């Protein structure tokens, strides 16, 4: 993708947000919905195993989120890594093909849905963008370290770039609209991503989203000022934000980010439940406040978010609530 195409891609992103009324809707939890349809994740690849066993279910879930009002589809590649696929006995060619498939499934769902609704005289939908998910190194480890940022003393920027490089090349080559780096836990991986985007001359707009375990800091305990100072120097990253953090942290983090960066802000928290990485199960919410995503989304938009959706344990119903609230509020 050359500079002209890169400019067009960035313009498309901004136009999509504008058409959505100034705040676009991201889809919700993929794994939760896949499980409802009968998928099994008893595998280190987690939801990425569906690229091998149940690709038709992935497309089905994408279509459900589009029907619910999503303006952005996030692909099923969060835990899809080349080392992960190779450890399952797949060849390099097969691993790369599965990464490409994750983007193709989302694009096919988007095009199929758009071709159907665009024929109708009354169409309230926007043509969705496809964001290719790039999970953190901790997501590949599957030990919960994406929520701690503790990768060990032997992991440095060079090793993280090597880990991400081929996956990013393949996903970018599949021509999504956005590259979505998700659940990044520390400054180290942020630096690696920024350097990698420059080295590979990736011109697809990227977003980098963090989790937070306390509503104040990145999962590693580092300040967001440290993390965002790295991003602010890059023209490759169009969006920063928060994903897979409890909803009660989001408004304060949007306000914090607004002070630290001029980048667009995306937020897609989890349902409020907490993932126990060691026990590999969800724990009940620690906070009993109202987690009605519709009303919360209005508050988050008013605080400065430009893209809002849901992460783990959210559903098409969540996205429908967000989309409806955005549209209803605009009509007032």
Image (cartoon, helix red, strand yellow):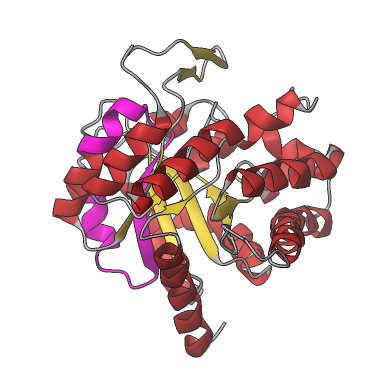
Q: Quadrant of residue 195?
A: bottom left
Asked whether the viewer can see residue 41, the reply is no
**Residue 77 x/y as whole percent:** 65, 48
Q: Quadrant of residue 108?
A: bottom right
Query: Which of 207/271 is in front?
Result: 271
Identified at 69% across, 47% down, the residue is 62
The verdict on residue 230 being magenta is: yes
**Residue 312 x/y as whole percent:** 53, 30
From the viewer's perspective, tell me whether residue 199 is left or right of residue 173. left
From the viewer's perspective, tell me whether residue 208 is left or right of residue 172. left
Identified at 41% across, 31% down, the residue is 293
Query: Which of 210/164 is in front?
Result: 210
**Residue 65 x/y as whole percent:** 63, 44
Total number of numbered labels? 0
Q: Quadrant of residue 260?
A: bottom left
Query: Which of 44/92 is in front?
Result: 44
Q: What is the magenta range?
A: 226-252
Identified at 45% across, 30% down, the residue is 270
Asked whether the viewer can see residue 51, the reply is yes
The verdict on residue 301 being magenta is: no
Q: Is residue 198 above or below residue 315?
A: below
Q: Is residue 127 above or below residue 41?
A: below
Q: Which quadrant, please, contains the N terminus?
A: bottom right
Residue at the far left: name it: 259
**Residue 315 x/y as whole percent:** 58, 31
Query: Which of 214/119 is in front?
Result: 119
């Amino acid at each position: 993708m050359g500079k002209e195409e890169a400019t067009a891609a960035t313009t498309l992103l901004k136009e999509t947000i504008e058409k959505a009324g100034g705040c676009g809707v991201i889809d919700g939890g993929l794994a939760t919905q896949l499980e409802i349809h009968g998928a099994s994740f008893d595998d280190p690849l987690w939801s990425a195993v569906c690229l091998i066993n149940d690709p038709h279910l992935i497309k089905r879930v994408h279509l459900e989120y589009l029907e619910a009002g999503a303006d952005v589809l996030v692909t099923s590649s969060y835990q899809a890594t080349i080392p992960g696929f190779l450890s399952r006995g797949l060849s390099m060619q097969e691993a790369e093909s599965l990464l490409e498939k994750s983007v193709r499934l989302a694009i096919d769902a988007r095009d199929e849905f758009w071709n159907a609704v665009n024929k109708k005289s009354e169409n309230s939908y926007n043509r969705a963008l496809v964001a290719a998910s790039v999970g953190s190194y901790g997501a590949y480890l599957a030990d919960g370290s994406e929520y701690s940022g503790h990768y060990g003393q032997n992991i440095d920027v060079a090793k993280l770039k090597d880990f991400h490089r081929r996956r990013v090349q393949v996903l970018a080559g599949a021509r999504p609209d956005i590259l979505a780096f998700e659940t990044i836990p520390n400054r180290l991986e942020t630096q690696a991503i920024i350097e990698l985007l420059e080295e590979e001359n990736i011109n697809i707009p990227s977003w980098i989203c963090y989790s937070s375990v306390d509503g104040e800091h990145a999962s590693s305990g580092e300040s967001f000022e440290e993390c965002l100072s790295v991003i602010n120097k890059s023209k490759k990253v169009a969006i920063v934000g928060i994903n897979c953090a409890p909803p009660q942290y989001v408004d304060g983090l949007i306000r914090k980010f607004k002070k630290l960066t001029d980048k667009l802000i995306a937020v897609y928290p989890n349902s409020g439940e907490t993932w126990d990485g060691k026990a590999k199960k969800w724990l009940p919410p620690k906070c009993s406040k109202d987690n009605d995503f519709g009303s919360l989304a209005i508050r988050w938009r008013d605080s400065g978010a430009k893209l809002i959706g849901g992460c783990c344990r959210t559903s098409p119903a969540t996205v429908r609530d967000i989309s409806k609230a955005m549209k209803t509020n605009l009509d007032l």
